[in-house]
Image (cartoon, rainbow, N blue to C red):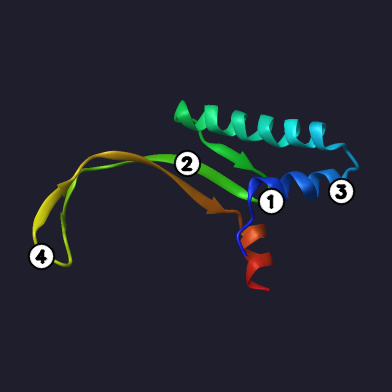
Amino acid sequence: MTRIKEDIIRDVMNRITLDRKYAKNLVETILKIMKNSLEQSEEVMISGFGHFKVRRKNPRMGRNPKTKESYEISERTVVTFYPSKVFRKELNS
């Protein structure tokens, strides 16, 4: 099952008994803070959950599997997530 932002807002509403407007504002604010930090190449760490990190990927050669034609994949920035030990342990139990 894929969780969408609306599901998260609904869960926040129900768990801490906020009305929808405040729950949505809370979720949007947290995501905006995380996004702004990552855009500035800052690491975002959430204890007991994990951390998000911005990485630069160097250009490399790729290949179209259908035509076998080679092409260059350009340099790009990606966000990676590293789960905490606590979170990994909970996932694996």
Q: Nearer the viewer, mark 3 or mark 1?
A: 3
Residue corresponding to mark 4: 68
Tag 1–tag 4 contact (CB < 8 Å): no
Residue 65 position in % (x across, y down): 18, 66
Tag 2–tag 1 contact (CB < 8 Å): no
Q: Is residue 50 left or right of residue 75?
A: right
**Which secondary structure, mark 1?**
loop
**Which secondary structure, mark 3?**
helix
The span from disc 2 to disc 1 (Cα, nearest Å) is: 16 Å
Residue corresponding to mark 1: 48
The span from disc 4 to disc 2 (Cα, nearest Å) is: 33 Å
N-term-proximal mark, 2 vs 3: 3
Binning the other alpha carbons within 10 Å of mark 1 as few (below 14), some (14 to 19) or many (20 upward) gives few
* Residue shown at the point (74%, 44%) measured from the top left: 9
* Residue shown at the point (69%, 46%) measured from the top left: 6
Binning the other alpha carbons within 10 Å of mark 3 as few (below 14), some (14 to 19) or many (20 upward) gives few
Query: Given the image, on which type of amino acid does mark 2 rest?
Result: Lys
N-term-proximal mark, 4 vs 2: 2
Q: Is residue 51 left or right of residue 5?
A: left
Task: Using the image as rendered, state which of residue 79 and residue 28 is in the foreground.
Answer: 28
What is the number of callouts on the image? 4
Residue 14: assigned label: 3
Residue 28 position in % (x across, y down): 67, 33
Tag 3–tag 1 contact (CB < 8 Å): no
Query: Given the image, on which type of amino acid does mark 1 rest?
Result: Gly
Task: Give the answer, above or below, for where 79 lies relative to 87.
Answer: above
Task: Using the image as rendered, state which of residue 33 and residue 67 is in the foreground.
Answer: 67
